[in-house]
Amino acid sequence: MTPVAASFLRAAIRARLSVVVSGAQGYGKTTMARALCGEFDPLEAIATFETEYELGLHEMPERHAIVHAWEARTGSGERGPDGKMTGEFTIAEALYDSFRFNVGRQIVGEICGAEVWPMIKAMESGSGSISTTHSADAEGAMRKLITCAMETGPQVTHELATRKLSETIDLIVQLDMDHDTRPDGTTRRRRWISEIVAISPGEKEKGYAATTVFADAGGRAALAHTLPDELRRLEARGFDLAGFLTEARTNGTLS
């Protein structure tokens, strides 16, 4: 990422904006999420919720002193009167348990299906949550999360799913990757941020507004594009606003 994009994301985390990191398999979503978590205050209490441990924040005491890590557990055998299989422990139950721990951040890991609702609840707390999901582009990530929410039950309409997600997600950070060939013939994976998109309620047809803050630069790290007025406040958190405006003018996206 460019230094300007780095300052923007650092300020966004400090301001407790909620972020979804998106990309295909192997594109570095978990690594990116872990890096964003690295901007938390080291003494801030964190709760993580994952179907399988991947973030590993609870294994970094030198960076995160207080981490409560929950891992979901699949059930087996017959279902009980409540419809759950024996031994099942869900992310939703873990999130409920976490409210007794006085945590400052609630991080729901990868979103593939029903985890979307715990993610929404974590983001609704205003703590500045971070999650990951698979998608080819930022707006595709929104469409996927809407579908995941609707698949949880017939009571979840497209309008409800869209409204809840647009009210809770602040930014989508899209990752891309290709392979560089070295002089000796070996290849090396190269990853970069291709888009950073701000999400907000609005636009009646879609149900949300998506503003491209940093835009795809054709295989290079995303460059400054359009900054919503409400995100100018991030300058007080260390965002290089002057650098953003200069970069946007250079790219012809700002008059």
Image: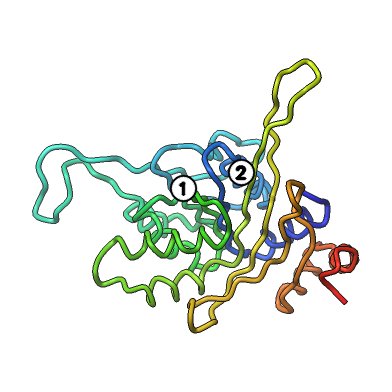
Quarter location, residue 244 = bottom right
Quarter location, residue 217 = bottom right
- Compare residues 248 and 243 and report the one nearer the observer: 248
| Residue 110 - label | 1
| Residue 24 - label | none
- Tell me whether the residue at label 2 lies in contact with that at label 1, contact meaning CB atoms closer than 8 angstroms: no
Q: Residue visible at 44% across and 64% down?
A: 120
Q: Is residue 155 left or right of residue 123?
A: left
Quarter location, residue 225 = bottom right
- Compare residues 94 and 179 and report the one nearer the observer: 179
| Category of crowding for the residue at label 1, using alpha-carbon neighbours closer than 10 angstroms: few (below 14), some (14–19), many (at least 20) | many
Q: Residue visible at 49% across and 49% down?
A: 134
Q: Residue visible at 59% across and 67% down?
A: 170
Helix, strand or loop at label 1? It is loop
- Compare residues 247 and 238 and report the one nearer the observer: 247
Q: Is residue 119 left or right of residue 255?
A: left
Q: Position of residue 137 (x, y in %)?
A: 57, 55
Kindly identify the amino acid type of the residue bearing the numbered disc 2. Arg
Q: Earlier in the sequence, mark 2 or mark 1?
A: 2
Helix, strand or loop at label 2? It is helix
Which residue, given by chain and number where applicable, does mark 2 sit on?
34
Kindly identify the amino acid type of the residue bearing the numbered disc 1. Glu
Judged by depth in the image, the label closer to the viewer, 2 or 1, is 1
Marks 2 and 1, Cα distance to the nearest angstrom? 12 Å
Assign the C terminus to one quadrant of the image.
Answer: bottom right
Q: Is residue 87 left or right of residue 238?
A: left
Q: Residue visible at 72% across and 60% down?
A: 215
- Compare residues 254 and 168 and report the one nearer the observer: 254
Q: Position of residue 171 (x, y in %)?
A: 61, 63
Q: Position of residue 156 (x, y in %)?
A: 30, 71
Q: Position of residue 4 (x, y in %)?
A: 82, 57
| Category of crowding for the residue at label 2, using alpha-carbon neighbours closer than 10 angstroms: few (below 14), some (14–19), many (at least 20) | some
